[in-house]
Image: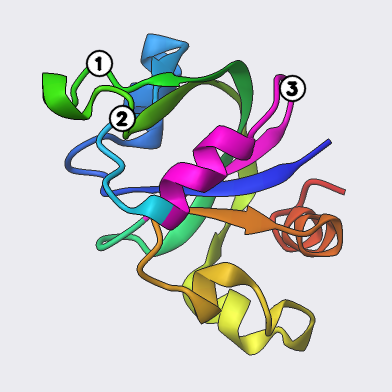
Amino acid sequence: MGYWLVKSEPFKYSWQQFVAEKETYWDGVRNYAARNHLRAMHLGDEVLFYHSNEGLEIVGIAKVVREAYPDPTAEPAEANTWSVVNLAPVKALKQPVSLATIKADARLANMQIIKLSRLSVSMVTEEEWDVVMELGGMV
């Protein structure tokens, strides 16, 4: 199983909206590294949902419910360049995990959200996932 993190600005697409919709495709990714992460996701992989820009915290857990396919919001000439996956919410963290908390925890020092902070889709190691679950009150 793989572990990932996706970022969304709450005023554009919040965890609450995601939960209300029950499923969405993760569109609009226009960075090749982030796109490659979407393409590497597999059915059932788990995903951390991070509120960026405002909030700056991991607020929930999602799962991949459909693997990568062409982004329907891409210009026709770029239809095969950009990809989406479908995600479904699983549950909110009992306690959101802030970026400040992530940066302060030495166990998360190499987490991509810190090292590659501009990426909207990033990989998470199993060890990092376990630490975030601990910090989020999930274990």
Q: Position of residue 73 (x, y in %)?
A: 19, 22
Q: Which residues are magenta?
A: 33-51
Q: Which residue is mark 2?
A: 27
Q: Position of residue 38 (x, y in %)?
A: 51, 37
Q: Quick one: label 1, few (<14), some, or many (20+) residues within 10 Å? A: some
Residue nearest the viewer, comparing 113 with 52: 113
Residue nearest the viewer, comparing 86 with 139: 86
- Residue 126 image-quadrant placement: bottom right
The three-letter code of the residue at mark 3 reads Gly
The numbered dot on residue 72 is 1
User: On the rendered structure, is 12 left or right of 97?
Assistant: left
- How far separated are the C-alphas under marks 2 and 1? 8 Å
Marked residue nearer the N-terminal end (2 or 3): 2
- How far separated are the C-alphas under marks 2 and 3? 19 Å
* Above or below for 8 versus 43: below
Q: Are marks 1 and 3 in contact (CB under 8 Å)?
A: no
Q: Which residue is mark 3?
A: 44
The residue sitting at 26% across, 60% down in the picture is 54
Q: Are marks 2 and 1 in contact (CB under 8 Å)?
A: yes
